[in-house]
Image (cartoon, rainbow, N blue to C red):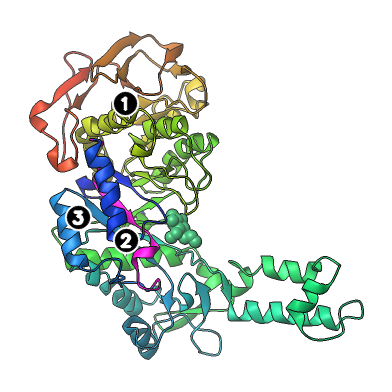
Amino acid sequence: MIGKSYIAPKYAFGFGQSRWGYKTAEDIEGVVKGYRDNRIPLDMVYMDIDYMQDYKDFTVNPERFPDFGQFVQQMKAKNIHLIPIIDAGVKIEEGYDIYEEGVEKGYFCKRADGSDFVAAVWPGWTHFPDVLNPDARAWFGGKYKVLTDLGIDGFWNDMNEPAIFYSEEGIRALNQAIADYVKAPDGGADDDGAEDIMNNANAIPWEVRSCIEHLQNSPEDYRRFYHNVNGQRVRHDLVHNLYGFNMTRAAGEALQAIAPDRKMLLFSRSSYIGMHRYGGIWTGDNQSWWSHILLNLKMMPSLNMCGFLYTGADLGGFGSDTTRDLLLRWLALGVFTPLMRNHAALGTREQECYQFEHIEDFRHVIGVRYRLIPYLYSEYVKAAERDEMYFRPLGFDYPGDRRAVETEDQLMLGNEVMIAPVYTQNVSGRTVYLPEEMKFVKFMPDGSIYEEVLEQGTHYVEVALCEVPLFVRKDRCIPVVDAAQSVDAIDLGTVRYIGYDGAEYELVE
Ligand code: MIG
């Protein structure tokens, strides 16, 4: 009913490193060197907002990236795809072509009086492209070509709720609240608002504080602007969740037109049912908390049920400082999520895998991902083509088994596998429920694969920090290859099958 799923390129099943804070070509080269020198596999480095010139969409800062086209090729030669971020807001700046074209063609969201709506985001004052208008959508999507022409073949769309720091109206309301306060009998006498508040012994009054708190993503702002949908004016708040959907649709449709025979990576932060036809989704700003590993696990089948198959969380956690054990356990879940990306916020501790002790553990865990990519990509493509789920709750496969139905910290993956990641700190393993006999498989740090048949029921399984566990269902098997440094370097000639003898597996690419 909601349409077929977008299919990501195979390279997008490789491991990606990201961080809000990489600014220059040297920063990115340093990350690639850190991975390659330590022989930790890597296929993608994400470029967060600082690659742009003053946060202007579809620009690249020429001082930070003196020859970006050449840099993209240099990275490609190392099997690294650069994945730039694209934000929703278009900077208001004379001489900036996208701003000028958008104004001239009337492609930005408008206020009730017909003027272009103004909101502040990273670039300062911006306009929002009216991606619900088919013409504006085609126009904005076409801009991705600026970067694909330079060799870029993947994007992440951000701030497309659209996120708003504050609007002109919001700032005016704040000024008014301050003015009202200083004019009030118990306030100061002069009208030098902010200074008056600072000199006042009393706390900033609630009216002013509430105004400040409501500046960001305010429902009032979302009622202040309109879309033009085939000539009909639609108020934004009524279609709020369709904005990110249509921004990503703009990109998806354009990328298909730009390179009809080539798959590109595309995922979004905001979305709505149906957007899965154009791209994937990541789960946004999580925290470096143990509870968020479990949250990651629980979100996967929900998103799959909505059609989003290419999905994953910020591994290691976005906000707050991660720890070595948290990152390793989280990566051991990330081994199975289509999007496997380590991402962290500005100001948090450095979180790249080579920043920690015993780098070999990270090399091993990410290496297991590469050993499984032929299987994982095959199950992913099958799910997309057959309109099925890649991750399922146990109850979908064992509906008659109440214990299975109530198990929410394990998932079925594809047709052969069950996963049960460790998501608590300071443990040497975890309890697992097996709805039927299965083969317990552990990828050991020395490269060997441990296999043990476990009967139906409850088991405590030992899983060390550097081991990756999975379960193969009875009478089934999965392909495993040797680890590789990038998806391109995977050698299918090394394939062997683990699980139950005599079982067959259909490998799809
Ligand atoms: O206001 O681009 O969710 O992944 O690193 C924050 C900076 C904007 C939010 C995204 C996050 C990204 C960050 N962005």
Residue at 25% of width from left, 50% of height from top?
8
Amino acid type at image mark 3 = Lys
Which class describes the residues within 10 Å of circle 2: few (<14), some (14-19), or many (20+)?
some
Numbered disc 2: secondary structure: loop
Of badges 3 and 1, nearer the viewer stands 3
Alpha carbon distance from label 2 to label 3: 27 Å
Q: Residue furthest right?
A: 185
* Magenta region includes residue 42: yes
Q: Residue 131: which disc?
A: none
Numbered disc 3: secondary structure: loop
Q: Is residue 232 visible?
A: yes
- Quadrant location, the C terminus: top left
Residue position for label 1 = 417
Chain-order first, disc 2 or disc 3: 2
Residue position for label 3 = 263
Q: Is residue 235 visible?
A: no
| Rendering coords of residue 170 (x, y %) | 64, 77
Residue at 66% of width from left, 67% of height from top?
214
Amino acid type at image mark 1 = Val
* Magenta region includes residue 371: no
Chain-order first, disc 1 or disc 2: 2
Q: Residue 24: which disc?
A: 2
165 or 113: nearer the eye? Answer: 165
Amino acid type at image mark 2 = Thr
Residue at 32% of width from left, 61% of height from top?
24
| Rendering coords of residue 251 (x, y %) | 30, 66
Question: Which range is magenta?
Answer: 39-55
| Image-quadrant location for residue 111 | bottom right
